[in-house]
Image: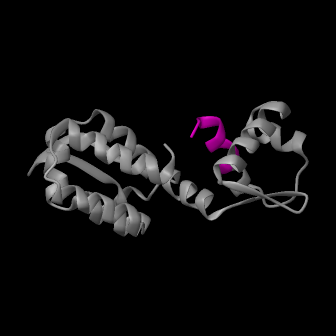
Amino acid sequence: MMEEQLKVLKVMSEVTRRVDMNTFAQMVGLNTSQTVQRMQDLVNSGFIKKVGGGYGITEKGQIILKAIKPLPKENAFHFYTGFGQPTGFSAESLKDFYEIVKRVAPESLDFHLYRADFENWIKATLKDSILTEELANLKVEALKGEELRQRILKAIAARYGF
C-alpha cells in the first residue's frame, strides 16, 4: 500500500462529518484528482467501499489502520540479539515492526522467533490470530537468517498490504 493511500485511509478514519471531495483532498494534502485516484485504488483493493453517496472503511481497512496506529510506549516491541543484548530498535506499530524486520540483524529474528516473542506480541497488541498463527508456523519450518526475514515480511505483507 502506498503512503498516499494510507494517508487517505487515516484521514477517512478521523473525519467525523460528511465533507465534499475538495475539502477532503485538502485534508489529505493531495489535489482532488490524486485523492479520487487513491480512493479508487482503495476501493479496488477492498480497503474502502461506496456507501450511499460516500465511502466507508471496510474491515480490511480497519485492520490496516490498526497496524499503523502507534501503540503505547510500554507495548512497543524491543529487538534483541540475545539475553541482555538490545539492538536499539523498537517497534511502536506493526508498520514499524515490518520496517525494522527489513534491516535488523538476522540473529535478532532467530532469537525472537524461537522464543515465540513475535507471535506473543502480535497476539497481545494487535489481537491478530491469523498473523500470530502464521508466525508460529515459521518455527515448525526451522527457518533462520535471511530466509526467515523474507517469510516474516511476506506474512505481514500478505495480511496488511505493506
- Location of the N terminus by quadrant is top right
Instruction: Tell me where residue 144 appears, x and y as whole percent.
Output: 15, 44
Instruction: Tell me where residue 109 appears, x and y as whole percent.
Output: 20, 45
Is residue 6 inside the magenta stretch? yes
Picture residue at 29% right of the left edge, 58% below the top: 135
Q: Is residue 103 above or below residue 66?
A: above
Picture residue at 46% right of the left edge, 54% below the top: 159
Is residue 70 found left or right of 52 in the rendered image? left
Instruction: Tell me where residue 22 appears, x and y as whole percent.
Output: 89, 39
Picture residue at 49% right of the left edge, 51% below the top: 160
Q: Is residue 44 visible?
A: yes
Is residue 123 inside the magenta stretch? no
Q: Nearer the viewer, residue 119 or 10?
A: 119
Picture residue at 62% right of the left edge, 57% below the top: 61
Is residue 158 found left or right of 34 in the rendered image? left
Is residue 59 found left or right of 138 in the rendered image? right
Q: Is residue 93 visible?
A: no
Q: How many marks?
A: 0
Q: Which residues are magenta?
A: 1-10
Q: Is residue 109 above or below residue 69?
A: above
Is residue 65 found left or right of 44 in the rendered image? left
Extreme-left residue of the structure:
83
